[in-house]
Image (tube, grey):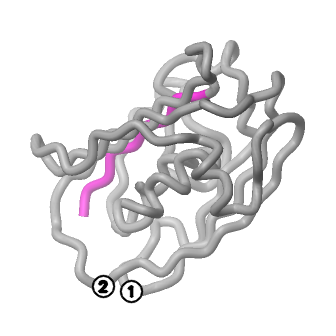
Amino acid sequence: MKFSLSFTPLFLSTLVASKSFLFASNQQTLVDDGLSVPGDNPLGFCSDPSDFILTIDNVDLDPNPPEKGKNLQIKAKGNFTEEVEQDAYINLSVKYGLITLVNTRADLCEQMKQVDETCPLSGAKDFTKEVALPKEIPAGKYTVLADVYTKDDEKITCLQATVHF
């Protein structure tokens, strides 16, 4: 869960992970309805991102799809069109089939420290993060949702992914 929270903010590329172990699959499913996050990844926006504060240029995973027991490198690039201050938050949900594994609200600024960023967040951001994926990942369907807001409840971004392995 630690990585899931850390990546979420990272561009949740957010959701990559919850990432971390959740995307360790050879079969990834994301309905392509024009809401796919640019780059080599299984992420999608929850809705039209044109009004989001965070514009995601790209998120790349290496390898994609991620592999159990190997390191996953995440590269993300984006731009905050408005300054994001303290008390911004992430609503993170991770489900395994119909079972909710994680349903939490996390402080965005606290999570950004894991990639050496601090609030306020503004302008262009570019980061690379590497995570070790565990070998023991139960087979099944995982659904991840990361909904990110400012302290005033303005949408920063919203990302989702469904992964089967």
Q: Do the residues labelled 2 and 1 touch (CB within 8 Å)?
A: yes
**Between 135 and 91, the one nearer to me in the picture:** 91
Q: How crowded is mark 2: few (under 14 residues within 10 Å), some or many (20 or more)?
A: few
- Please give the name of the residue rendered at 24% of the width and 64% of the height, measured from the top-left corner: 165
* Magenta: main secondary structure: strand
Name the residue furthest left: 98
Residue ID for mark 1: 69
Q: Is mark 2 on a helix, strand or loop?
A: loop
Closer to the camera, 63 or 51?
51
The residue identified by callout 2 is 135
Taking the view exactly as shown, the residue that stands out farthest to the right is 123
Q: In this picture, which residue range is highlighted in magenta?
A: 157-165
User: x, y percentage for residue 73?
Assistant: 61, 72
Point out residue 50 in the picture as x, y percentages from the top left corner. 69, 16
Q: In this view, does 135 lie above or below 92?
A: below
**Residue 164, image x, y percentages:** 26, 56
Residue at image coords 63%, 64%: 74
